[in-house]
Image (cartoon, grey):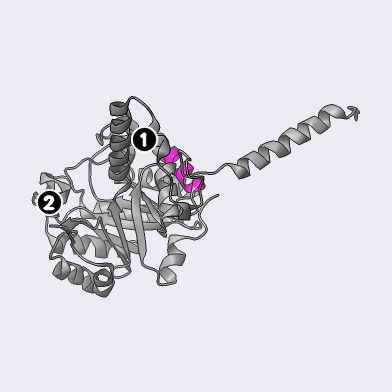
Amino acid sequence: MGPKTTIRQLLERGEFIWAPCIYDCLSARCAELTGYNAILLSSCELEYGMNGTPASLANWEEFIMKSERIARASSLPLIVDADNAGGNPMQVYRNCRRLAEAGVMAITVEDSESGGLSCGYHYRTTTSCMDRNLFATNIHAAVDAVKGTGCMIIARTNSKGGGSERTGSFGQMGGLGLEEAILRMQMAHQAGAEITMVQNICHAGCEAECRAIAREVPGWRFYPDIHCTDGKADCTFEELQEWGFHLVSNHVAMKAATLGMLHCMEQNFRNKSSVYSEELEIPAHYRLPPHNFSPYVFEEWMELDQKYQAYQKKLEGAAVVSRF
């Protein structure tokens, strides 16, 4: 299948991009069915799904393979959270080039200095961000890598510190401050990044920080992981657009899947039957068979299979004439 549009096309049309974090083809399909206009492959959620921990156990071959499968399976443009993309210019160039060739429409490249694919959760401390000059050089390499493709580079800095309590206690650790984060985004923009993301501005009362970023950092701006406080969204889409932001994401797929599985499995286990889960129906407006166990239909593949079976039977019924 592959995406019907690109991140650039959405931005140039003035569409506000709402990209939920996903981790596989199934979660990508659910985002497509529910009306989103883009998806974001979370390296953290991907690692949870693959290894049960976000502890840098995945490697780049696995990551690129997963990215390609999701990009080809969904009609939505895929953004990939590539952590530091390898950490040095040559690794960044190679990995970003391969992701772009795999059909990815945008790649986040960050300034965490951890060595693994996933940079772990120390990015709000003062010691975990790479030198700003190395970061800008990595962005320059990433931009070079995706030239001639439909892919864009999103420069992301984790240097600011602070953040929402929803991210856990690590979100309250110190950092280098907003001024340093803005400087890094300015350097990234000069290096060619058309989209920037300052991490840890996603909390209640973030307007002043957001407006400061919009004043000082050119290009399109990504607000990371919208949260809520006391049952109320920390900000609205209308506010984000007024403050100068053009993209937003949030973590929803893995939590939603976990809650759904826990609920259905618990009911079936208690009832010692599959009645509960089998009797649940997919709402009619999704245009899927009501008792399907997945959000997919297979008519297209069945038609292809029938076509090739018919071709094989035709060959079997015909006399073979050698041309030699």
Eyeballing the image, is 106 above or below 121? below
> Crowding near pointer 2: few (<14 within 10 Å), some, many (20+)?
some
Circle 1 residue: 276
Give whichever of 177, 255 is nearer the camera: 255
Q: Amino acid at mark 1?
A: Tyr
Give whichever of 171, 23 is nearer the camera: 23
Residue at 27% x, 51% y is 110
Circle 2 residue: 165
Mark 1 or mark 2: name the one nearer the start of the chain.
2
Residue 192 in sight from this viewpoint: no
Left/right of residue 185 with respect to residue 102 in the rendered view: left
Boundaries of the magenta span: 64-73
Give whichever of 315, 106 is nearer the camera: 315
- Which one is closest to the eye, mark 1 or mark 2? 1
Tell which residue pokes out farthest to the top in this image. Answer: 272
> Crowding near pointer 1: few (<14 within 10 Å), some, many (20+)?
some
Task: Please tell me whether residue 77 belongs to the stretch shown in magenta.
Answer: no
Classify mark 1: helix, strand or loop.
Answer: helix
Q: Residue 140: x, y in percent?
A: 35, 56
Residue 22 in sight from this viewpoint: yes
